[in-house]
Image: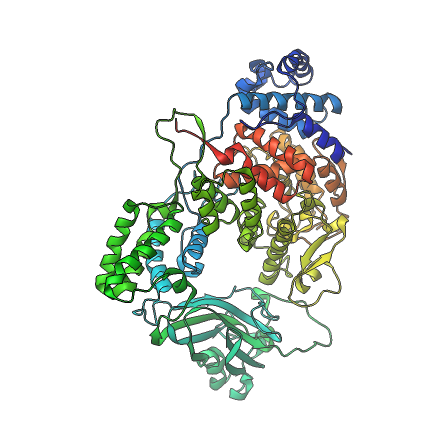
Amino acid sequence: MRTLSVLTHVAVVVAVAASAAGQGPAPNRQPAASARSEAPAYEGLLDQYCVSCHNEGMSGQGTVPFAFEHLDVTDVGADAAMWETVARKLRLGMMPPLGRPRPDRVTNDRFVTWLEGQLDAAAAANPNPGRSVVRRLTSAEYINAVQSLLAFEVDEHWLLFPVDDVDQQGFDTNGDVLSVSPALFDRYLVAANRISRLAVGDTTIGPGYAATTYSSPRLQYQDDRTSEDLPFGSRGGMAIRHYFPLDGEYEVKIDLRRMIYDYIIGMGRSHQIEVRLDGALVEQFTIGDADRFGYPSAYSFFGTIRGDPGWEDYVSNEADAGLVVRFPAKAGMRVVGVSFVDARTEPTGILERRLSGFSLSGLGFYQGNAAVERVEIAGPYNAAGPGDTASRRKLFTCHPESGADEVKCAIEIVTALARRGYRRPVTDDDIAPLMRFYEAGLSERGFEGGIQKVVQRLLVAPEFLFRVERDPVDIAAGTAYDITDIELASRLSFFLWSGIPDEELLAVAEKGRLTTPDVLEQQVRRMLSDPRASALVDNFASQWLQLRRIRGVAPDADVFFDFDENLRVDMERETLLFLESQLQTDRSLLELLTAEYTFVNERLARHYGIDQVYGERFRRVPVDADTRGGLLGHASLLTLTSYPTRTSPVLRGKWVLDNILGMPPPPPPDDVPALEENHGGRDVLSIRERMEQHRANPACAVCHRIMDPPGFVLENYDAIGRWRATDVAGAPVDTGGTLADGSVVDTPATFREALMAYDVSFIRTVTEKLLSYAIGRSVEYYDQPAIRRIVFEAASNDYRWSSIILGVVNSMPFQMRSAEL
């Protein structure tokens, strides 16, 4: 096994630490003349170990991507993109392939160190910060911007924006994929109208305008408390954050879950349902005990043999027909809680396994727990005015006492809105068109109607919806230049908060002080300590790890009957809490792979075989580092890299190569056959045996020899992340394999040790992903020197999150831009 220590890696990085343009050389770079003198020796190294494959003949056949005959080792800057690929593969030990002659480790690392130093020197001589295109706000950025601007929480249920596309890295912040379709612009118009009326408190809003229906996931069990916003001693239901537009009366209607034959489930027992507003009890209903209405249908024949008419009517219609309550509420964001009173009982006798979906028995439908399917909130009825809401306090910074004061007050409000919404100082040319909308609204509905029209217009303004950075006047095409303080403030806020700059950040930028190093660092640290920095977890980390995909996976219920919607949610929650704790406590990025703790509730703890964890609340617990240490032990990531019926060493191996080592394999050829599955009547083959058949095809073997070992070593985890000792054939799981660099691994623990031998490569991968997310474009070869410098400078601080983030913010790609060609 390869055992290069962290200290050795740091020494290597020190030797190769690169300069981003304008940031100075690494401390121990060789003089140019000395570096050039070593070129002939390294040319000989390439001739000895590489040219036998990477030659013109093999390249012409398409067997290899390039030939070294066409690359000049004395001028690596001329083909920097290709040499960057060479450096990365050599540093990861992926070339030459196993079985071919290789230089010893010291010689290999010395060459990579020299090569990266030459690439960095070439980049410093010709700075290229790249160029991000004009791009619209992502859906998450739009929601956060509205929240910051208007103190109004946008409800995604009615926003209905098309899903943002993602780039090859999985990020939706890339300007190249953020298109504006007619459907999206239509939704912008609808959203602007709705948000402006709700935020201002339009007194013409009727009961149907803000009515919203909230649904629970169909396959969610409601046997336990489902939210921290619901009372202890409750089970099921949902806690809803709903915006009440005006002071008035509102109506809540509850629909209960039904089975396939349209019977309401759980009606064989009595249940109590509570409706609460901000925790205060509004109404309590009693339902169930359906036997009192007549003889029921036979449990095993629901839908075919009918019960007494009274019973049929109750369990089909009447049980939830009266679950309606009207109550007074103040305007603003409120929490509506709908839940059952938990009547805890302990089952006795021989327990059946938990069933789901179509597998539920009639007895389970009738005598089980009732569940809430949907809740509709409508109103206001008998509206009493706009009330005192956070959004009105944010908007109406002045209140005109007479008609003569209205224009002055309106200009004050409009100027403040435009400055924050456009993220820059505003001019009379910015204010004039907004004031025309104010005047139109004023004539229709008075002063507040005018402000509502201004908000509506601003929310569809290009200056709000798009992030635009303008080249300086008369600058030569392709010239690298520093972005302005105002532009830097927007880059910073969208990077760390996925939203617009706050008042302090914008004020500092307006004074031209943000580019002062001490001030910039102070602002970064302030922003990281703000709760809005959770956007780095919700938007960056979840996209980097592809965690959002867990919401769409569907393990086969006949194979994995323990999987349900509750477990899916818990899996995602675990990983988000883990990442949040890492960021908030400013841990080393290396702990993402080595941490000996995680966050679980009772459901997930049972899934992992962890004892003494009770209740739905998540808490931090220690884990066995050999089986659950770090991200690679998280069920969320193991599940999203599996198929519905089985694990996939290929998907898992590809995920590791892409997201941990930063070396994604190429896509498979079009004519490569799919893996042959097991079928009834044949011998059951293990995944490894089927993969060996697959690799018999030479076209498949080239990539699979690199992808498969990282996947096979994780075969102790089944397709929903449970630990197992035997495979589907009942044989002991074979997790052994040899990685591309020759390291032999046979357990998740030894695999983590092998990955830690490439700790700096992992840090570079995370840094590259973070930089791409931050600057809104794909990382290119000319960004690699800046990435190396970020990692080099973060080494002295143990690669903590803050040091990497500060490195990204201080980097050339983040603070500079190339003029349009």
Residue 564 visible in this rendered orientation of the protein: yes
Image side of residue 524 versus residue 760, left or right = left
Residue drawn at x 64%, y 34% as measured from the top left: 793
The quarter holding residue 317 reads bottom left
Q: Quadrant of residue 90?
A: top right
Rendered location of residue 287, percent (x, y): 52, 82
Color scheme of the displayed model: rainbow
Q: Position of residue 58 (x, y in %)?
A: 58, 18
Report the front residue among 263 and 426.
426
Q: How many marks?
A: 0
- Quarter holding the N terminus is top right
Q: Is residue 534 left or right of residue 406?
A: right
Regarding residue 459, the answer to whether it shows in the image is no
Question: Could you tell me which residue is drawn at 76 percent across and 49 percent down?
Answer: 625
In screen coordinates, is 677 left or right of 137?
Answer: right
Q: Nearer the viewer, residue 556 or 815?
A: 815
Vertical side of 765 occupied by 260: above or below: below
Give the percent coordinates (x, y) of residue 363: 60, 75
Q: Residue furthest left?
A: 443
Side of 497 relative to 205 (left or right): right
The quadrant of the image that shows the C terminus is: top left
Give the answer, above or below, for where 414 lies relative to 695.
below
